[in-house]
Image (spheres, rainbow, N blue to C red):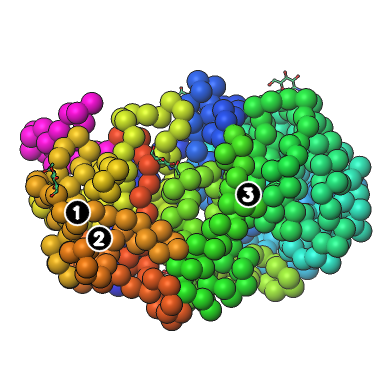
Amino acid sequence: MRLSIFVLQVSLLSTALLHLPQPTKALPLSTNGRWIVNKSGRRVKLACINWVAHLEPVLAEGLGKQPLNTISKSIASMGFNCVRFTWPLFLVTDDSLVSMTVRQSFQSLGLHESIGAINVNNPAILDLPLIEAYKAVVANLAENSIMVILDNHISKPGWCCSNSDGNGFFGDKYFDPDVWIKGLTQMATIFNGSANVVGMSLRNELRGPRQNVISWYRYMEKGAEAVHSMNPNVLVILSGLSFDNDLSYLSNKQVDLSFTEKLVFEFHWYGFSDGQAWAKGNPNKVCGSVKANVMRRAGFLLDQGYPLFLSEFGVDQRGGNVNDNRYLGCILGVVADLDLDWALWTLQGSYSLRQGVLGLDEVYGVLAWDWCKPRNSSFLQRISTLQSPFRGPGLADVPPYIILFHPLTGLCATRKSLLETLQLGSCDESAAWTYSEQHTLSLKGTLMCLKADGESENAKVAAICNDTRCKWDAISDSKMHIATKLTASSSSLCLDVGSDGTTIVTNPCKCLNKDKACDPQSQWFKMVNSTRNVVNKDSLRTGIKDEGMWAAQ
Ligand SMILES: *[C@@H]1O[C@H](CO)[C@@H](O)[C@H](O)[C@H]1NC(C)=O
Ligand SMILES: *[C@@H]1O[C@H](CO)[C@@H](O)[C@H](O)[C@H]1NC(C)=O
Ligand SMILES: *[C@@H]1O[C@H](CO)[C@@H](O)[C@H](O)[C@H]1NC(C)=O
Ligand SMILES: *[C@@H]1O[C@H](CO)[C@@H](O)[C@H](O)[C@H]1NC(C)=O
Ligand SMILES: *[C@@H]1O[C@H](CO)[C@@H](O)[C@H](O)[C@H]1NC(C)=O
């Protein structure tokens, strides 16, 4: 057990090394249509992790567990190039917090053990004022080439978010719009010189009984102008209503700003955003309907030409939450398809104090409780290919092609050693497909195409193929079953993973729309557009030119 975990971590590390974070000299960022780009106009994909500093102690979590630099290095080694770093408004607007040191903050909460732990792991920050400690984290992330998005998560430090916590909307008890503008202005000014601070999220998850569209435009425009006037370099990121699930009103009316090429929208999407719908329904049906809702509420912004940042998503990484598990397969397909910028919830393995509980375990955290290792390396494997871009300005290493991405494993259909069969393997070695009007999936630049041999047989790459078993359709409401038929009258076979866990086979399509208990995810493959340069290891090793993968170009 120990050994196999170790092997996984080593292979993860090598995947991460392929995608070393971009050096921060490529900053600042701006927008080009729906893409975020660097100064040369080349796409920069935000593959962020949320890191929390907005709870009562107002210090980045984990500094009592590990040295700051160790945490930053682990973020990079897990393949993230960016941190969405939360802060409470009162950090810079409340007189007592402005002058408070880290030690005093923990003392005031009676967290004496945490003080000892911080003194062991990060003695240099213990007597810094809270804002200086926050700056020290940003500076250390810069040293590790990690970008930062400052996220104003709440006003009054504490766990977020509920409809009645007084932090939900302009005019709530702790949410005076003037104080908010003042705080944003200060943060924008403080970090104007920090090259790795590439964006500011103006306010997390607007919500509650006061929320309304008119005030949203009024204050978001004011906040955006305030930030931009103090710091013209940062992307200005606007969150929607109803816990950042709803930006639909932007389909009728755009925000009116004095500046261009800096505006990004963010939205949140969790399994629990739809209650227990995933666990209680047929996963294909729920995936189809929830995705349609998400597109209507937020996804349409991509077509309007704005970047859309999925700034929170995540699951219980222990693997036992059915609602989360089904949602994860679906959302990973969507994130791959749309090649979204995103921030996973969350980094912290535990909190010094959350909702009154000392040392609370964060089961959505990528780090384990002790912050020493990843909580679940198979989860990291599943998101690893989504950490680098598939496409976008300046990235067309090769002409567009299609990959078959398998969200359950995070792997792709690959072809090893010119074999007829296909295996799940790294998406960096993915087979590259063309999907024709005749619904064939052919290896790009060749006439060879994907063919079903029979039930429970290996899916094949065949040289000659001109019948129904070579015609493939994305079926079911999820559009993630890649299906064919042996004869015009037979029932559908779907791509699936064989019993060895690696070989790709064709099995009867499962749980298409009725069964609620059934989990279709082994059969979920997403056809994703890509222009990534695929490494074909066989051609490198043998010196044999790959049989024309790019020859046609
Ligand atoms: C933009 O990114 C590309 C790829 O990382 C890099 O080669 C280029 O130098 C960057 N542009 C600037 C202005 O830094
Ligand atoms: C922010 O930094 C830019 C240079 O990056 C500078 O031109 C500008 O004057 C600064 N703004 C303020 C308000 O200090
Ligand atoms: C990691 O996640 C997988 C799948 O979600 C689950 O089966 C496994 O038990 C988890 N491992 C740990 C150590 O939590
Ligand atoms: C494929 O079959 C159809 C009908 O059987 C035939 O009309 C067509 O010419 C064939 N195409 C090729 C490329 O062989
Ligand atoms: C993928 O490419 C095809 C063909 O160019 C296009 O029709 C489709 O809209 C693209 N998908 C996405 C999500 O952009």
Q: In which quadrant of the rendered view does residue 116 lie?
A: bottom right
Q: CA distance from mark 1 to mark 2?
A: 7 Å
Q: Residue at x 82, y 32 (%)?
A: 226
Q: Can residue 429 be seen in this snapshot?
A: no
Q: Secondary structure at mark 3?
A: helix
Query: Could you tell me if the residues under marks 3 and 1 are in contact, i.e. CB atoms within 8 Å?
Result: no
Q: Which residue is identified by label 2?
A: 484
Instruction: Name above or below for residue 550 compared with residue 312.
Output: above
Residue 535 painted magenta:
yes
Q: Which residue is identified by label 1?
A: 470
Q: Earlier in the sequence, mark 3 or mark 1?
A: 3
Q: Quadrant of the N terminus?
A: bottom left
Q: Nearer the viewer, mark 3 or mark 1?
A: 1
Q: In which quadrant of the rendered view does residue 448 lie?
A: top left
Q: Can residue 242 be seen in this snapshot?
A: yes
Q: Which residues are magenta?
A: 534-553
Viewed as shown, does residue 25 lie left or right of 203? Answer: left
Q: CA distance from mark 2 to mark 3?
A: 33 Å
Beta carbon at label 3 within 8 Å of ligand 5? no
Q: Which residue is identified by label 3?
A: 298
Query: Could you tell me if the residues under marks 2 and 3 are in contact, i.e. CB atoms within 8 Å?
Result: no
Q: CA distance from mark 3 to mark 1?
A: 36 Å
> What type is the residue that disc 1 sits on?
Cys
Q: Secondary structure at mark 1?
A: helix
Q: Residue at x 44, y 61 (%)?
A: 478
> What type is the residue that disc 3 sits on?
Ala
Residue 30 painted magenta:
no
Q: Earlier in the sequence, mark 1 or mark 2?
A: 1
Q: Secondary structure at mark 2?
A: strand
Q: Quadrant of the C terminus?
A: top left
Place of residue 189 in the rendered image (x, y in percent of width and height, measured from the top left): 77, 31
Viewed as shown, does residue 140 lie left or right of 170? Answer: left
